[in-house]
Amino acid sequence: MCLDNLYLRAGDIAISVASKAGTATSESSGLPVVIVTGALGAIGSALTDLLQADYKVIGLDLSAGADIECDITSESSVNSALQEVRENFGNQLAAVVHLAAYFDFTGEPSPLYEEVNVSGTRNLLTALQTFQVEQFVYSSTMLVHRPGKPGDLISETNDIEPQWAYPQSKAAAEAVIRNHHGNIPVTILRLAGLYDETTAVPTLAHQIARIYERDVKSILHSGDSQAGQAFIHRDDMLSLLKLTIDNRQKLPASTVFVAGEPGVMSYRELQHRLGKLIHGDDDWNTITLPKPIAKAGAWLTDKTEPVIPDDFDQGERPFIKPFMIDMASDHYELNIDKVQKLLGWQPKHRIQTELPVMVEKLKSNPVHWYQRNKIKAPAWLQTASEKSANPEHIRQRYESEYQQQHQQSLWAPFTIIGLGFWLLCSPLTFAYQSTALTYSDICSGLVVVVLGWMSLSGAKSMQLARWGLAAVGLWLLFAPLLFWAPTAVAYLNNTVTGSLIMGLALCVRPFPVLMSPTAAVTGPSIPPGWQFSPSDWFQRLPIIALALIGFLISRYLTAYQLGHIDTVWDPFFAGANPGNKNGTEEIITSKVSEAWPVPDAGIGALTYLLEIITGIIGSRQRWRTMPWLVLLFGFMIVPLGAISITFIIIQPIILDTWCTLCLIAAAAMLLQIPYSFDEIIATIGFLRRRAKAGHPWLLILFTGDTDEPSAADKQPQPKSDNFSQSPWTIFKESVLGGISLPWQLLLSALIGIWLMCTRLTMGSSGDMANADHLIGALVLTITVTASAEVMRPLRFLNLFLGMALLITPFIFSSSLMATVASLVCGLLLIACSIPRGPIHNSYGQWSRYVV
């Protein structure tokens, strides 16, 4: 990566003027006149302040507020500005310090480089030919030189070979100066990367920000970590400029200096030093990525990462660009013998000793530091600032709690490592009888051991290994299905081991998720206006328990599909086709099931297990700390519940039989739906509130955020997740949390069950039986879902199904008894769909929709 010495960004074009002692003096003040371009910039204004005691300083700038407004891209504007200088201050100038320049860090060519840096310099020099100028000082960059390697020193005689658009424009501007300065003596200063206590060149500033935020990119590097680049402190740069002007008459007519601090800190040294200063890490991990991978990643993030508006109504693309990857090993270490000899200049600051001060400035006011360095602050920092909280205190508390939880949970990665060794031995111990599954488990075991060892580290970057472990665990669950495990013990071993690895990797604190520090340590447990947290354990236990039932049933059915057992239990239904198969066996070996390339019951078991794990992850604040997880949890439950109901519907209609275990599993899935909606509603409401408050909801979706506390959350809540209560009390609170079943819904559910069974109770057959079954299944689904108080309005859909029951007897052939039953059920269903029934809880702004 490249360092630069300017604070200017795209569109910043400035010109300034200053004066200094010498033979050229201002008629009004008697002080020598110095013009400094870029007067309103950070360096221009500081230089003006430094020089004004000894020189008459005149500032030229494109923006209003300068002594003289001037656009150096326009010849007429430059001529007009200098004519005004001539009229007010005379024809003699002690020095012209040219700081104005265009700069951006996109790496892309821009016409402004030519217009401002090259043509602008030419316009300025051409207009100065009619003046008596004792010195023209040009602020260039060390980046015009060809980069070296660690150990090489760059001096003024090194080859000019700039690597990207900005230094190329600076090199072109130097060529213009050599060809157009005429009789004006010139001094070119090729400066190192500029910094001070609160600001730094973009590459260093972003490196600091990445480490401060523990961004995953903070541990990745694609070049030689021993390479480094020289810096120069702002005060040292200003003193150099003043010395250059003061000694203008002693310098050769054409002089070039490279200037910066002697010696450099390598990229690795910077990483370790910053990690220690910011987080107290003694050894900040840095992973070297191959350049092709790093370049592809930089290109992909630059093209796909969302631009999220910030408080200044502007977006910010990812800082790291593909062109930077090619220069990640560039080394710029300077030989400053010449400037020491001719000017006696010696930098008084060193980046090594200034880093603690810089980090302290960052920690004392992070938001201000980000603003000063023109970096978009992370959302949690902005939120903390808005709440008048100290962002650094929040970050430190978050880091402390994270490390404490990690230390308390070290048993988990050690257990995972043990499971990895277990996997290595399992194929030989249990005689898998499958070469593919044997190799799969051996390779998976090796990966688990490595990733488990990596996850022992408390560094957040290493917690990515836990997601890798989860991926391996998922593969272990899927591999027996893909390879059709020939033995029951192989299927059991992979199921248990994969489940444990996934659970230990994802469910043990600290949770390996990208969480905002503000979300983690501030904010309420209960959504505003609610009376309970929808993420309480009591709210999640019914879902986890029901998913466990579905998981065990699905594994049992999978064992039959894999050929591990010869029969499946079904006490009620015989098969529709001749043979010895019962209803369950016939359905799970039907053409519908066999259309899958793997056992479909095994896919169901895998899905139920994922529900269990996602149900366990997170605290009672996860509705706002892990919004993505809540929505993923709901996505697995609600659509899969619909699929299960569909499966129930097609059993008698298409397959002409039933599956007892399938019905039980589908019922378990259906019952999960009402328990999941309150958390989904709370999460969506939270995201809407943050979006209305002007926060980036897409970012908050993945990192979480704080929220305004509700009145209930401020009150003591002794019953929240209180497992010290009696088992019966825990059961009631778990089953009835956010759920109620008034008599209207209970009757509607009974009607749905009756309709699904008219083949048995009424002797119905054909299209009428199929219609009753379809409508009954839909009624039951809607009614069960509407038992969730937040989804109570869904009951109105039963009105249309009741109307359908009034019509079907006259469309399909039916007996008199079946017709009367359908009409009665239709009228009862319509009547039961209108009253809401009692609502026992408050749901904030969502309560208005619970009608």
Image: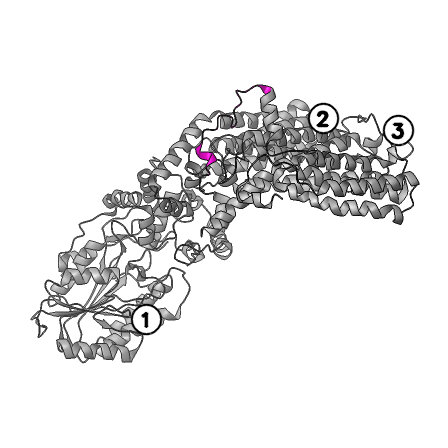
Q: Is 354 situated left or right of 114 in this image?
A: left
Mark 1, Cα crowd under 10 Å, few <14 / some 14-19 / many 20+, is many
Please state which amino acid type lies under the numbered disc 1: Val
Residue 778 appears in the rendering = no
Residue mark closest to the camera, 3 vs 1: 3
Q: Please tell me whether the stretch drawn in magenta is mainly helix, strand or loop.
A: loop
| Inter-mark Cα distance, 3 to 1 | 88 Å
Mark 2, Cα crowd under 10 Å, few <14 / some 14-19 / many 20+, is some
Which residue is outermost to the top? 726
Q: Residue at x 23, y 75 (%)?
A: 125
Q: Which residue is mark 3?
A: 580
Q: Earlier in the sequence, mark 3 or mark 1?
A: 1
Residue 550 image point, x, y percent: 69, 31
Q: Is 600 situated left or right of 224 in this image?
A: right
Q: Which region is colored magenta?
A: 710-727
Q: Earlier in the sequence, mark 3 or mark 2?
A: 2
Tell me the SS state at disc 3: loop
Please state which amino acid type lies under the numbered disc 2: Ala
Please state which amino acid type lies under the numbered disc 3: Asn
| Inter-mark Cα distance, 3 to 2 | 23 Å
Tell me the SS state at disc 1: helix
Image quadrant assignment for residue 11: bottom left
Residue 615 appears in the rendering = yes
- Please check the rendered image and state whether residue 715 is part of the magenta-colored stretch, yes or no: yes
Q: Which residue is mark 1?
A: 116
Q: Residue at x 53, y 30 (%)?
A: 449
Q: Earlier in the sequence, mark 2 or mark 1?
A: 1
Residue 323 image point, x, y percent: 42, 58
- Please check the rendered image and state whether residue 353 is part of the magenta-colored stretch, yes or no: no
The label number, if any, that marks residue 488 in the structure image: 2
Residue mark closest to the camera, 3 vs 2: 3
Depicted 714 relative to depicted 823: above or below: above
